[in-house]
Image (cartoon, rainbow, N blue to C red):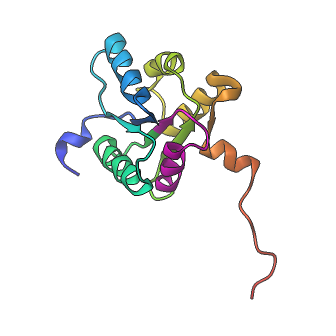
Amino acid sequence: MPPFRRRFTMPGWVIACHDYIARDYSQQLEAQFGPLAQCRTVNYWAGLSTNMLSRMMCDALWHVDTGNGVIFLTDTPGGAPYRAAALMSHKHPHCEVIAGVTLSLLMQMYPLRKSLTSEAFRDAIVQAGGEGVTSLWHEQQKNPPFVLLHDY
């Protein structure tokens, strides 16, 4: 890992939403808090291929990952950005996928970004967001993985 990528100790953020929502959220956060370290946006438009979305998400992940985890913040549970992030998260340690984020929730949670691990941040944002916010981890707890009862 290049030395410049080791300076930060907080999890990286990838804000991935439909249309220009991710860009708009990022601009509003920057207006409030200044430049956003370890943060990238991915805008998903109708007609964008799944392959291209995955490449964009992978590029964003690579740019924000310093080894302290990455949090994907998506707008719609089950939407294309959420699904792409969910597939990527299984290959990266300390990678969390959050769905249902809003600008006001991100504004509220931004100050906690530097002090919480990715797992602790996941739990805090889901609790703060109420019913409309969930995470891949929380959804997996509702539906545990399928287990074979017999060895063949």
Taking depth in this image into account, of 50 and 135 the one nearest to the observer is 50
Res. 128 visible in picture: yes
Residue 82 part of the magenta-drawn span: yes
Taking depth in this image into account, of 66 and 38 the one nearest to the observer is 38
Name which residue lies at 40% across and 57% down.
Answer: 51
Residue 28 part of the magenta-drawn span: no
Residue 151 image offset from top left, x and y in percent: 76, 84
Residue 8 placement, left or right of 95? left
Res. 11 visible in picture: no
Above or below, 46 relative to 151: above
Residue 47 image offset from top left, x and y in percent: 43, 47
Q: Dividing the image into 4 quarters, which one contains the C terminus?
A: bottom right
Name which residue lies at 24% across and 42% down.
Answer: 5
Residue farthest toward the left in the current orientation of the protein = 3
Residue farthest toward the right in the current orientation of the protein = 149
Residue 135 image offset from top left, x and y in percent: 61, 39
Residue 63 image offset from top left, x and y in percent: 28, 43
Residue 34 placement, left or right of 91? left
Residue 117 placement, left or right of 39? right
Looking at the rendering, the stretch of residues picked out in magenta corresponds to: 72-89
Taking depth in this image into account, of 66 and 42 the one nearest to the observer is 42
Q: Quadrant of residue 14?
A: top left
